[in-house]
Image: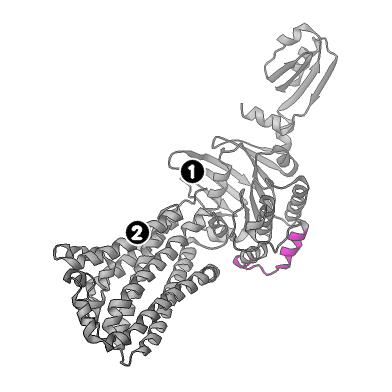
Amino acid sequence: MLIYNREIRKNAKALFIWGIILGGIILMTLSIYPQFTQDQETMNDLLSAYPDSFKQAFGMDRLDIGTLLGFYGMQVHFMTTLIGSIYAVMLASNMIAKEENEKTIEFLLSKPITRTRIMTEKSLAVLTNILLLNAINVIVCLIGFQFADEGIPMKTFMVLIFGTILLHITFAAVAFLLSVMMKKSRTITSVSLGLVLISYFFGVVSGITEEMEVLKYASLFKYVDAADIISEGAIDILYLSIMIGITIISTWLSYAFYLKKDIAT
Amino acid sequence: MKAVEMNDLTKYYKKSRGIENVSLSIEEGEIFGFIGPNGAGKSTAIRTLLNFIHPTNGTAAIFGKDIVSDSKEIKKLVGYLPSEVHYYDDMKAIDLLQYSAKFHEYKNTNRIHQLAERLQLDLHKKIEDLSFGNRKKVGIIQALLHEPKLLILDEPTGGLDPLMQNIFFELLTEERNKGATIFFSSHILSEVQKMCDRVAIIKEGKLVTVEKVETLIKNNLKKVSLISEDSQIADFDLDGVLNKETNGDHITFLYSGEIKPLLNQLTALDMKDLLIQEPSLEEVFMHYYE
């Protein structure tokens, strides 16, 4: 596991920074919750002041912001999914292409190690980093929930976290595939960041009007929509299958393509 | 068993040619040179052997193992020095070399320090702070460290000063005495002449010839220099005369063929001086490129 160890060590600093930023935002947001509930009435007034389409876009019409889970779903979930996805694609898109850009891949390929092994160790490193970031996320949330004097339904919270992790992994798998197929690592990072943001945008737009609703299929963020998960207590099996499908196909294509790839000078 | 065997090895890139139908074999323990100008396909051949790129056609084997399907096994036996050394910038030289040793499960890391001392390399500098020549030294140690049975060196001396080149050749000789086979590409002929048993000449992706270095120099060509005020000299011509250059009363040319007709022609001339000698490999090489 030499390559895996090196990738983990190399990316530890970035993970640390992302963890601090994400954790800080979560803690700050959750610390507002007690004031929110104290002043339920003004808050309802405040919410009703928003236009309906805005509320629909962000699922505010279906989430009860007066409960801790509803507050989490509306105020924190979108950040953990979005920020985590950005982290995941930035990490994965650099995995293979960077070594090729900097030609350090020639070093690895001249060692007694198969290309499959290189791919496996690198994708495991991406997976580990995503899991670690989400572990930070969960721990910080559990601490943040202590601000409120009410409990949180753990099962539903865990489904939300599971959805978040699956979303991150799906985006990472797509970015990893791009990292294998494309050349310039800077382009790959931009393209995969673009994918995340467009996907997020589609998710928001699809909530606004009926006609736009089909767009939700183009948005991975809609697949793990907090309002859906909190009301159903589970992720829609169709969405689940699509995400797992994208991950498996992208990973398989990455391996297949990389085994045949010519490492150009 | 041959150390390296290529059979009709061919590699085309999307549009351009890489190498075409290259067949050659290298004996175990041999030092084999691979000579050609830039762009002739030397690196392509080497990268194909290491399976960085996949052959379009033909096969090759290293110690009897197929270069595509047994690439991992092959790399246990091979040390590779790229023409341009690119390593992880964030590592120190010593980190990189220890990382490399771990891949080969090579335990005798003392050898890193021994080799670094010979090559006068500071192991505790970051790779990004090293000069081109010093990076090359890291590459050399990386290639030699695990005492491979086959060394594949792509233009190994580029960036090394003459003193370092000598130390490098000493190190190669030591590896050879331990039984290593050495395959190296170069466009500098004198170093090939100095080191190699046999040499392959490659031109525009095709193998021109494989010869023993001695044969290449001895059998085919003579270099003739003469000084003469004879006015006939400008008309001097004979089958097998190449690269004739006239400079006042000086005339030099290469000659390939029977020596007797040459001498018969020469005796007819009124000469002040005559020198017939072995041509340098450079001249032999130019001849193959005509």
In the rendered picture of this protein, how many numbered marks are placed on residues? 2
Decide if residue A253 is in sight here.
Answer: no
* Horizontal arrangement in the rendering, residue A164 relative to residue B45 (left or right): left
Q: From the top left corner, tell me how far across and down residue A119 is, in percent.
A: 46, 64
Going by the numbered disc 1, the residue's amino acid type is Lys
Rate crowding at label 1 as few (under 14), some (14 to 19) or many (20 or more) other CA atoms within 10 Å.
many
User: Does the magenta segment cover residue B109?
Assistant: yes
Going by the numbered disc 2, the residue's amino acid type is Gly
Residue at screen point 28% across, 67% down = A220
Q: From the top left corner, tell me how far across and down residue B221 is, in percent.
A: 72, 27
Q: Secondary structure at mark 1?
A: strand
Rate crowding at label 2 as few (under 14), some (14 to 19) or many (20 or more) other CA atoms within 10 Å.
some
* Horizontal arrangement in the rendering, residue A52 relative to residue B165 (left or right): left
Q: Nearer the viewer, residue B249 or B71?
A: B249
User: Does the magenta segment cover residue B279?
Assistant: no
Residue at screen point 58% across, 59% down = B75
* Horizontal arrangement in the rendering, residue A87 relative to residue B96 (left or right): left
Above or below residue B83? Residue A32 is below
Decide if residue B130 is in sight here.
Answer: yes
Closer mark to the observer between disc 1 and disc 2: 2
Alpha carbon distance from label 1 to label 2:
37 Å
**Dot 2 corresponds to which residue?**
A194
**Dot 1 corresponds to which residue?**
B11
Above or below residue A137? Residue B99 is above
Q: Which chain is home to disc 2?
A: A
Give the overall secondary structure of the magenta segment.
helix
Q: Quadrant of residue A240?
A: bottom left
Q: From the top left corner, tell me how far across and down residue B216 is, in percent.
A: 70, 33
Task: Write down the region rendered in magenta.
Answer: B100-117
Above or below residue B36? Residue B71 is below
Q: Which chain is home to disc 1?
A: B
